[in-house]
Image (cartoon, rainbow, N blue to C red):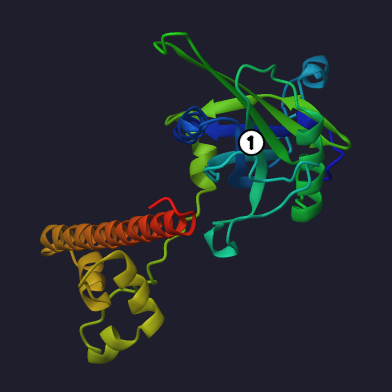
Amino acid sequence: MAVGDTPAAAKVSISGAALAALLHRCAAAAGDCDGLLFGRASRVPAPPPSLSDYDDHAAAAPPAPALAISVSGHSSLSHPSSLSDPLGRFQLQLQPASIPSAPVGFFSSRRRTPLRPSMRELALAHSLAETLAPAHPLLFILVSPSASPNLSIHSYDYRAYLLVGARLVPASLGVVNVGPGFRDQYHSFVAESPLPWLPPHQPSSPAAGHAHTIGEQKAVDDMVDGFGIGRLQGAVCSAAGQAAEMDDMYAGMIRRLEKLAREVEKSNLRVLEQENRNLLLRFRSAGME
C-alpha cells in the first residue's frame, strides 16, 4: 500500500493491554514523552462476493479495508523528546539489538494540549517515514493525559493519525480485547523468544540431547539459572513429570532475577561511592573542606 492511499482503506487497532501500557507510560513520565510503536501491518483478504439480488445495496456498502495495522507494544526512553532533535529530525537512540521488530509508527504525549499534531510532530513523521520506508501509512498516536487538582481523577485523551502524503490525517483507532474481534490479531501472532528450537526428543538417538550449540545454551542460561537444554527439552516434550520440571525452571528464573538484582544493587552502590568521592574532590579543590 502506498503512503498516499486514503486512510479509509486501513483498519487501525490496538489491544487493550497495549493501550493500557501506553497510557501508563505517558502518565508515569515526568513531562512530555514520545516513543516508537510496534505491531504488525498485514493485508486483509478480499471479502467473498455478495450474492444479493439487490445491486443497489451492494454498491452502497462501504469498501472493506485493504490493510490492517495492529499495535502490540511500544518502546520509549525515560527522558522527553527522545525520538527527534529540536527540528523534528528522527534520531535513533536505542540499540538496534533492543528493537524487537520494525516499528509501525510512533506516539507522543503532551499534557493538557489539544489533540492536534504540531509542526514538530509532522516533521518527525516525515523523517521517520523516510528512515523506515514502510510499505504502509505511518501511524501516529497522540496522547494527552490530565489529572484533577487533588490527583483523584486521571483522564486520558488519545487520537490516531496516519501519514497520508504530506499530512497527518485522523484515523479511527479500535481497541481490541479478548473475544471474537481479537481473532485478527491472534491469527497474525508470531512468537518471538530467545529460547532455541526444541524438537521432540528421540530416545533411540542418545546424541540428540547434545546437538545444541553453545549460543543456544547461553540463551537458556541468560533466562534460567542452572537449567540445561536437555532438561528443558524433556520438560517440553514429555508429559510425565512436567509440572515438577516447570516448577524447577521457574525457580531457576527467579534465582536468575535475584542474581541480576544483586548485581544492580552492587553497581548502584559503586556509583554512589564514586559520586561521593567526586564530591569530596570538588570540595578539596575549592578549599571548602
Residue situated in front as seen by the camera: 49 or 275:
275
Residue beneath the point at 46% across and 31% down: 28
Q: Is residue 132 left or right of residue 284?
A: right
Would you name the residue on which mark 1 appears? 107
Q: Is 23 drawn above or below residue 280 in the view shown?
A: above
Q: Is residue 197 above or below residue 107?
A: below
Image coords of residue 56 (percent x, y): 83, 15
On screen, residue 129 versus residue 206, left or right, reads: right
SS type, badge 1: strand
Total numbered circles: 1
**Residue at image coords 35%, 83%:** 212
Residue 73 in the image: x percent, y percent?
A: 52, 43
Q: In the rendering, at what x and y percent does residue 22 appear?
A: 51, 34
The N terminus lies in quadrant: top right
Query: In which quadrant of the rendered view does residue 119 lie?
Result: top right
Q: Quadrant of residue 160?
A: top right
The single residue placed furthest to the front in the displayed view is 287
Give the residue type that dot 1 points to.
Phe
Query: Which percent across, then down, holds residue 184?
Result: 54, 39
Instruction: Please indicate, yes or no, whether residue 217 appears anywhere in the rendered image.
Output: yes
Q: Residues within 10 Å of mark 1 (few under 14, many from 20)?
A: many
Residue 6 lies left or right of residue 204; in this view the side is: right
Residue 284 vertical placement versus 171 (above, below): below
Residue found farthest to the top: 149
